[in-house]
Image: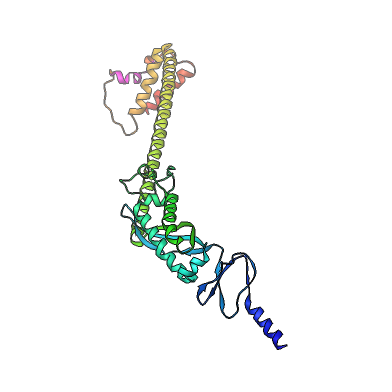
Amino acid sequence: MIFIGALLIVAYASAYVVDEREQVVVTQFGKVVAKPNVEPGIYFMIPFIQQTNYFPKNLQEWDGDPGQIPTLDKTYIWVDAFARWKITDPIRFFQTIGDMYTAQGRLDDIIDPAVRNFITSYSLIETVRKSNRELPVEIGLDEDHSAASYSTIAVGREKITEGILKQAQPKLEKFGIEVVDVKIKRINYVDRVRKSVYERMIAERRQMAEKFRSEGKGEASKIIGDKDRKLKEITSEAYRKAQEIKGRADAEATLIYAEAYGSDPDFYSFTKTLEIYNESLDKNSSLVLSTDSEFLKYFKGYSDMPSVSHGKAGRGAEQGISAVAD
């Protein structure tokens, strides 16, 4: 039983399991003694003498520390990059690096300088854009730089990240590491530049808003001017037509008066004289005139009245003279 128990303990200590996410390097006194086990399954080793070193086989994440980097056009930006990598040669990885924590530091030492090198080698627009697609609006651009001058992209962001990958990969191959991809997570202005950019963007938007307001006021003034002009045209046309109608009416009235008074001029003179009497004389008037005055000719007697003394007209004339005399 003791022998069987010892045998079971030895068998348990000598067996190890490798799953699909791992790869194992077996060492003896710190030296690699066998090929790495990269396929999932159960494997055996010499217990208490040999050791297993597990390393991940799937993709690993590297997240660089964001840092301030100047571009070729001397613009300081805040760059945050990340990468995906994996262990392709676990033996070399074990012999040169040894563990995952040290691997992260080594990636920092290699990828970070590559990112900085490429960012400083190109202008800001190259790190932001990837094509020459026309910009819909000019946002955050200086007055002496138009969107057209910035739209010519020689390299672009994708080519820059590919260059970072190509520069970093040869330096990591000797460690048994393969960098699968490198991307820029975020690019932003540094705080002191960001504030001035935001202020410039706000000023540009206010300038555009003021331009729209002035254009709107101009259109409003134009509409109001057109309205006033049309109103004056309508008013003047209406006044002209009214004057024409009034003139024709006055002409017709004058013609009717002329025809009516022309039939009896003496009676017309008599009625007009009575109107003058009524307008010029009242109860407070004092007037001394000769009886030979033409103005008082109808006060001399009824003999000077027009020959309309009979009928209603004659009676009206008599009453008119009496009223004026009173």
Magenta span has 294? Answer: yes
Q: Give the image location of residue 254, x and y in percent.
A: 41, 17
Task: Please state the extent of the stretch shown in magenta in the rendering.
Answer: 293-302
Pick the front one: 299 or 162: 162
- Farthest bottom residue in view: 2
Q: Quadrant of residue 325?
A: top left
Above or below: residue 209 compared with residue 185: above
Q: Quadrant of residue 10?
A: bottom right
Give the number of marks: 0
**Quarter placement of the N terminus:** bottom right
Q: Give the image location of residue 125, x and y in percent.
A: 38, 49
Q: Quadrant of residue 214?
A: top left
Pick the front one: 226 or 5: 5
- Farthest top residue in view: 263
**Quarter placement of the C terminus:** top left
In the image: residue 43, left or right of residue 81:
right
Above or below: residue 282 compared with residue 61: above
